[in-house]
Image (spheres, rainbow, N blue to C red):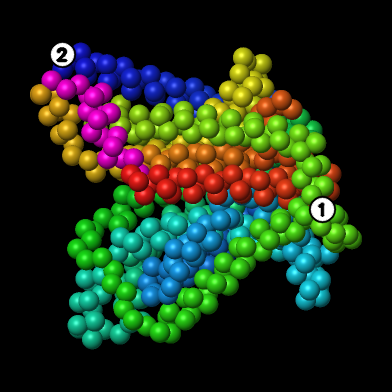
Amino acid sequence: MKQISKKKLNSTKILIIAVFIVLIVLPLFRMLAFAAQIDLSAFLSSPALWRAVVNSITVSAVATFFSVSIAMILAFCITRSQMKFKGLFAILITIPMLIPSISHGIGIIIMFGANGIITNLFNLPGSIYGFNGIVLGSVMYTFPIAYLMISDILSYEDTSVYDAATILGIPKWKQFVSITLPYLTKPLIAVVFATFTAIVTDYGVPIMVGGLYTTLPVMMYHEVIGRLNFGRGSVIGAILLLPAVVSFIIDTLSKNTAVQNFVTQSWRIRKNTIAKIFSTAYCSIISIAVLLPILSFVILTVVQRYPIDMTFTLANIARANNQGAGGFLINSLFISVMVTCAGVITSYLTAYLTARFEGKLSRIMHLLSLTTIAIPGIVLGISYAIFFRGSLISGTFSILILVNIVHFFASPYLIAYNSLSKINPNLESVGMTLGVSRFRTLIDVILPQTRRSIAEMSLYFFVNSMMTISAVSFLNTTRTRPLSLMIPMYEGQMQLESAAVVSLAILIVNLIMKGFVGLAKKRA
């Protein structure tokens, strides 16, 4: 009986590995092979390509520096001070993660454009388009991600080392230099690479405020969508894979070496009035900056024509609905619900097999599951467009659901993997000794213990599926188009009011989902 059960497990693992190969490896290889159809040497030596490469690296490096710096100070303020309203600040800081990056570009135009609210209010000179606009927009949507990662790192730091240092009379600044910085170094490298990769592969912000400052994702978008040149798009996709792969390797190595110490004593926050005042002021300023784009969406939604006619109206909502926003919202909800249901089941099952049953096949599955995080959405989208072109799922909801599951698979998988790894590893063996099948043990014992993790997985899949643009840009039709893709369409038609309506709708849906999951976690 045990032998038969082991054979079934191995067969399931082999099947999942085969599915991973079909959905991840083969599309990427097909994309790379497609590049052979163009004059590769001529394209690689073109000044336009290398100008885009330099632009992408430059703007991403600068934006990463500011994003990680802001996030680090925020993380220290919230985790290491006695300031009030920490929960509220933590929610406000993460709001940018609930809207597409392209919406941040719209918010910047509304606030800091030639006729922007802040520009007119303070009579600011200069232009927001180009390098400055991309940096500002990239920082706006990536610093919350860096903040969450750094906060998680700080939550595992052992305070007993600092207590010993204090007893020995070591001053605070020297404790920071000798203890805190070495502790943060390796995991912080992973944060930097993850942030850099998110910025360098994004085309939402650059396409809105980049102007003539072309980056690689924007160039790829124009080549594929504008010129239908999949060959050149494949080459750019291969280039964009490089920083993502480096980030994946760094992240994997840092996970093996970082935060391995056992926390004997959680961090005790000591009274410090100056730190409390500074933290409150800093978090308030960042929160106001976060809310400005949201405020701009509200203003544009309810005015006739900004800044010409500021009369209150609901015509913008009606106009967006008449242009199909209601139907596209239903498409997005359908895709997001299906991605959430199928994604949670597949990622949880995969994590269960890798975390609870050791072996070579489990290690291969674990590696393949993590590789999805190293594939930018825009690269995955073009690889699917090439690989599945002419197939039964091409142009259907199925391919949009599939690409979203693969695109967002890694993070929910890791949530489940970490939770399942902490549960007593002998549960299944004890159950089988008592005549209880593995399936019943999973349903009756393990699932109830991981309900909070399942709620987090559901939120991640749903929210990201609602707002993604890059992964689905090359795969949708007018019948299957998700709501998020109306934003670049409206931008191209200079209908910023309608784009604001769509951005606000996505934010409201994601906030409702976040609130629902929050309640579910409290009851779990």
Relative to 200, 354 lies left or right: left
Q: x and y percent of residue 318 in the render?
A: 79, 42
Q: Is residue 166 visible?
A: yes
Q: Judge by depth and name the residue closer to the eye, 19 or 507.
A: 507
Badge 2 or badge 1: first in the primary sequence: 2
Q: Which residues are magenta?
A: 435-452
**Label 2 sits on what residue type?**
Met
Which image quarter is the N terminus in? top left
Residue at x 69%, y 33% (from the top left corner): 328
As for residue 142 lying within the magenta part, the answer is: no
Q: Judge by depth and name the residue closer to the eye, 39 or 202.
A: 202
Reading the image, the residue beneath label 1 is 313
Residue at x 38%, y 68% (from the top left corner): 79
User: Furthest residue to the left?
Assistant: 433
**Label 1 sits on what residue type?**
Thr
Q: Residues within 10 Å of mark 1 (few under 14, many from 20)?
A: some
User: Furthest residue to the right?
Assistant: 308
Q: x and y percent of residue 4 in the render?
A: 20, 13
Circle 2 SS class: loop
Q: Is residue 503 above or below residue 410?
A: below
As for residue 446 lying within the magenta part, the answer is: yes
- Quarter assignment of residue 335: top right
Reading the image, the residue beneath label 2 is 1
Majority secondary structure of magenta residues? helix
Residue at x 47%, y 81% (from the top left corner): 277
